[in-house]
Image (cartoon, rainbow, N blue to C red):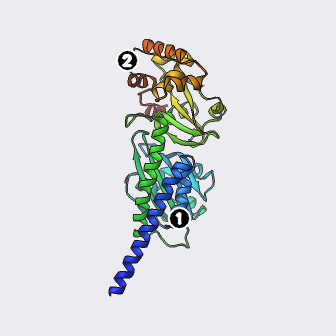
Amino acid sequence: MEEGIKAGDNTSMATLKAFNRCVLHVGRLARESGASRFIAEGLQAFSQLVPFASAWWGEMSTAGPNVAPQSWMHGSINLPESFAAEWHPVAANDQFSHATLSQPGEVVRDMGFNDPCEAVNDFARRYDLYHLMSITFELPESGLMFFVCLYRGQHEQHFDEHEAELFSAFCDHLFQLWRFQVQDMIRFDTDDGASDFGIARMDGSLLYVGARLCAAIQRELPGWNGSMLPVEVVSQLQKAPCVVRLGRCALTLSPNAEHVILSLEAPSRAEGLAPRERTAAMLFAAGHSYKEIAKLLSLSPATVRTYLRNCYLQLGVKSKVELGSVLRSPGSLMESARRD
């Protein structure tokens, strides 16, 4: 009996050490690889502790009346780029997806091709998604949910309770590191201050996106379904900093290392500003200094100061916080996009 207890203790200690090494490795990845790559590399490291055949993660909107859940930003391991697009037609009937989105912070597991909707089962069979384990996190500043889902095939072992506990603990760290990186790049101060922002790689793939920005783009380009920016915007990324018109909305593009920050401009009081003034104001509201803005826009700090003074006078604001509030549209774009 004592030997059995000691063996169990040794196994638990070995698992704890392996988990700690994994978490430390993910922390280093977040610092060295940057937000663009560390989630995929982090999950690959976790697969040494909890093996899986494929994985999917990203940001998703929850289901509403007559509205199916949708993945707006995603990445994957051992799944094709078309995976999300193929899932969207069956998303409204996917019971596993509804279960995990309705229980944020909880690990949800399932097994078998047993969804009441046969189209969902056909989709799962196509990629051998027999064993499923997923977790979602609320992302209030975005207006969306962050999710991670792991899969195993039909001839593999199911995900057990012990693996679910490790997955939950690991994803807490993964989500926090990713969220910190997003916050550092966007530099927002309020819980709901980033729903009209996005972060994209230079190829147009999204690293982060907010619900209002999604709604505005989809309103102007009804066929757009997330994850990759529209070609009209991608073609302008190398020109950042700049302002891009997209139908009735305007996007400010600001460079940030290998990424570009996108911010949705308010269509009201800010419309009277000149494009360069709007760009300077958006950069200032996002946390950039006069000198940083001057360098980004190839202007003198004195010119930037003049632009910002004009913006403050024209918009009737007295602080950076008020400036950001006016430049960002507080209206419910997601709801209006659904009505449109």
Local secondary structure at mark 1? loop
Q: Residue furthest left?
A: 2
Location of residue 142 with respect to 74 vertically, above or below: above
Q: Position of residue 26 (x, y in %)?
A: 50, 56
Q: Residues within 10 Å of mark 1 (few under 14, many from 20)?
A: some
17 or 334, which is in the foreground? 17
* Residue 324 visible in the shown view: yes
Q: Position of residue 159 (x, y in %)?
A: 46, 68
Task: Find disc 1 in the rendering and name its residue.
Answer: 47
Q: Position of residue 7 (x, y in %)?
A: 39, 81
277 or 159, which is in the foreground? 277
Res 318 label: 2
Measured Cα–Cα span from mark 2 to mark 1: 51 Å
Name the residue type under label 2: Lys
Res 333 label: none
Q: Position of residue 109 (x, y in %)?
A: 43, 63
Local secondary structure at mark 2? loop
Location of residue 230 with respect to 23 vertically, above or below: above
* Residue 69 visible in the shown view: no
Q: Residues within 10 Å of mark 2 (few under 14, many from 20)?
A: few
Q: Earlier in the sequence, mark 2 or mark 1?
A: 1
